[in-house]
Image: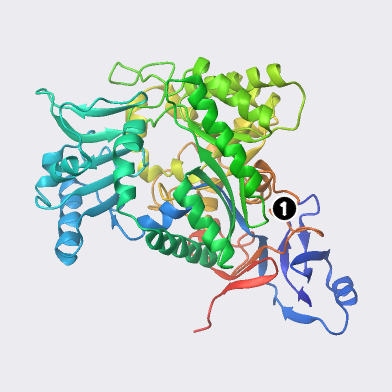
Amino acid sequence: MTDVYLGGKVFTATSRRWATALVVQEGRLAYVGDDDTARRLAGAGAGVTDLGGATVLPGFVDGHAHVINTGESAQHVDLWGASSLDDVQRAIAEFAAANPELPRIRAHGWRHDVVGGQPTRQMLDAAVPDRPVYAQAFDFHSVWLNSAALAEVGIDRHTVSPPGGEVHRDAAGDPTGYVDEIAMHRLVYPVLDDFVTADDRDQALRQALAGYRASGVTAATDMALDAVDLAAFARAESAGELTARVAAYWFVAPTGDVEQNIEQVREAAGHAQRHKSDRLRVVGIKVMIDGTIDGCTAAVSRPYVTGVGAEPIWSLEELAPVVTEADALGIRVAMHAIGDEAVRIAVSAVERAIAANGPRERRHRIEHLEIAEQADVERLAALGIVASMQPVHCDPAIQENWRAMLGDDRVERGYPWPYVTEAGGRLAFGTDSPTSPHPPLRNMFIAATRRSAIDPSLPANIPAFALPLADAIEHATRDAAWACGAEHLYGALEAGRSADFVVLDRDVFARPVDELLEAKVTRTVVGGVTVYEEKPL
């Protein structure tokens, strides 16, 4: 079957940026160009859709996401709008009262400045004293537990913090209820995972995919994949329900033992051999070199305003063998590095891998790069490392604490996207959902303005770093696909690639940029199949 789409304003994200027509055959684009040629190529029996001048974009590729967590978080207490501790406590208490059958309460989205920095178990006990409460920070790098939750996961005064994370304690030595980084992954998540069934994960994935279809996300790069999430993706693929393409990075945590670390890399390589379809691919590993600036756990070369810094989760000596092994096995490495010291470690680890393994095609990447020295950005560009960044993280509405913790000139070079492109590097955009909202048009508004999608009246966050809208969209489509090795399949509209595209309700290139916050996706197409269509009123 051949389908032809005519009369559109088609942004291709290729060197030929504009077209008016698409011809789709067997799920792929057979032609992208003018209407007359498209009609001739499609032939008399083709299905014809008149786009009526609508704007068409390549399907958005979320370059950094936590897909199943995005669906799960939609079912928890949403604390994103909370502006005080009272707001947080009230939202959690009201949700608990409305859901008396739930054995435990899950919440997400609180900000450190709202709860006074590091919150305590007593604050949550005041809201819900009789059931475990787990409240995830907005950046998903720390979790806040009440007394019942601490008891449920078995954290007490005798619990030892693992390398790369901390169970915070009060003056008496008792846990405060604030647990961050690797301690959260090792001590809290495994217990919570035991309460989540395969059906729960399948439902969370369905919810995330529904959100993707409605907002125009046709592919996502899933970070921090584990066995249970991989199984859920595989079930969805087998059932024909994976309506967004997924390229995934297996999470590797430091163990303190070189051989155990490398064994995790080899496990990921095995998954990469087994999962390499056009809907589900395991493409590499994910490591977290540091934490966040809001939590003062990002590794920075100069101290925070508190006068202290933070040690990296992975030192260069620990990380380099892991990166070198992954590089030798032909899988990619994604490295979470927010602080400038962590960025330096990431770049140096790739440099060592190149020295060890010699010339080869490689697309290792650094995630976030919220502050980085120009010299390190130039090094990463020269080494071919992708800068994977998230415009939604620099929304001015969530920057007060970020700026306060740095407190110096570093705040004026935060989220330096132009540094990357000017150095000749590849820049890929994503959202890191659920740490931020996943809809891509909001992301593009922030990229093009450095203004807030939450409160557009706020002053822009370093407006000189804003990008032309067309460039931002290319970073969120073509470049995000290239970063995970999918440029032959999706990310741009040209003959031979999959017919993954979205139709908008307005021309976002011609209309005022603020309309990106109002614009809607009216149709989402994946592999030539319409997976979402807005119903007329």
The x, y position of residue 455, in whole percent, is 38, 52
Q: Is residue 211 above or below residue 451?
A: below
Q: Which residue is mark 1?
A: 13
**In the rendered view, does 173 fall on the left or right side of 194?**
left
Residue at 73% over, 48% down: 487
Residue at 44% over, 62% down: 202
Residue at 14% over, 26% down: 170
Residue at 56% over, 32% down: 265
Residue 28 position by quadrant:
bottom right
The foreground one among 529 and 204 is 204
The mark total stands at 1
The x, y position of residue 119, in whole percent, is 19, 37
Residue 239 position by quadrant:
bottom right
For badge 1, the amino acid type reads Ala
Label 1 element class: loop
The x, y position of residue 444, in whole percent, is 55, 52
Q: Residues within 10 Å of mark 1 (few under 14, many from 20)?
A: many
Residue 105 position by quadrant:
bottom left
Q: Quadrant of the N terminus?
A: bottom right
* Colouring scheme, one of rainbow, by chain, secondary structure, one colour: rainbow
Q: Is residue 36 above or below residue 487?
A: below
Residue 513 seen in this snapshot: yes
Residue 216 seen in this snapshot: no
The x, y position of residue 362, in whole percent, is 70, 32
The foreground one among 465 and 251 is 251
Q: Is residue 166 above or below residue 212?
A: above
